[in-house]
Amino acid sequence: MGFQTEFNSVCKFKSEQELYELLEYGRCKMRKSGFRVYPTGQKVIAYSPANEAVAIVKISASIAEITFQGDEVTLVEMDLVRKLTEEEARVQTALADEMFFGEQGSK
């Protein structure tokens, strides 16, 4: 049992519903498997399930727990700071593809 650290600049959604709630209501709660450490109070780039940069969010809470079923999960609450412009999204998506989401070990 241990904590996995997330990159400070990346917050990737696995669920379109969670992303929709963030963009529609300005806040959301994201559920991640395993214990993870998110930088509470810090602004990060949020990515869609398709690895596209969509917004800047501020992490308001990060709670790691073990469920009654014995699963390790982390709940991350965040507030929308603003959506990215089309140009910002294009650049951030390209950078993230090269740095985080692209093929591992390729040059």
Image: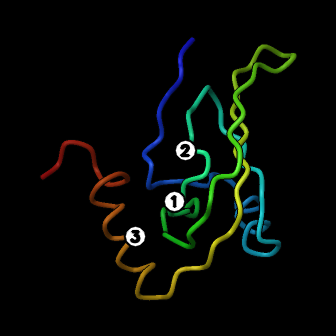
Q: What residue sits 40% from the left and 70% below the top?
A: 93
Q: Which amino acid does label 3 sit on?
A: Thr
Circle 3 sits on which residue? 93
Q: What residue type is labelled 1?
A: Val
- Position above or below: 68 against 107: above
Query: How many numbered tags mark residues here?
Result: 3
Circle 2 sits on which residue? 39
Seen from the viewer's position, the closer of residues 57 and 42 is 42
- In space, the residues marked 2 and 1 are separated at their CA atoms by 9 Å
- Asked where in the image residue 27 lies, by quadrant, the reply is bottom right
Circle 1 sits on which residue? 44
Contact, mark 1 vs mark 3 (Cβ under 8 Å):
no
Q: Where is residue 17 in the image (x, y as percent from the top left)?
A: 77, 61
Label 1 or label 3, whichever comes before in sequence order? 1
Q: What residue sits 17% from the left and 49% below the top?
A: 106
Q: What residue sits 62% from the left and 55% below the top?
A: 13
Q: Where is residue 65 in the image (x, y as percent from the top left)?
A: 74, 23
Q: Where is residue 96 in the image (x, y as percent from the top left)?
A: 36, 61
Display coloring:
rainbow
For label 3, count other residues whose C-alpha is less than 10 Å away and answer few (under 14), some (14-19) or many (20+). Answer: many
Please tell me the numbered disc located at residue 99.
none
Q: What residue sits 77% from the left and 58% below the top?
A: 28
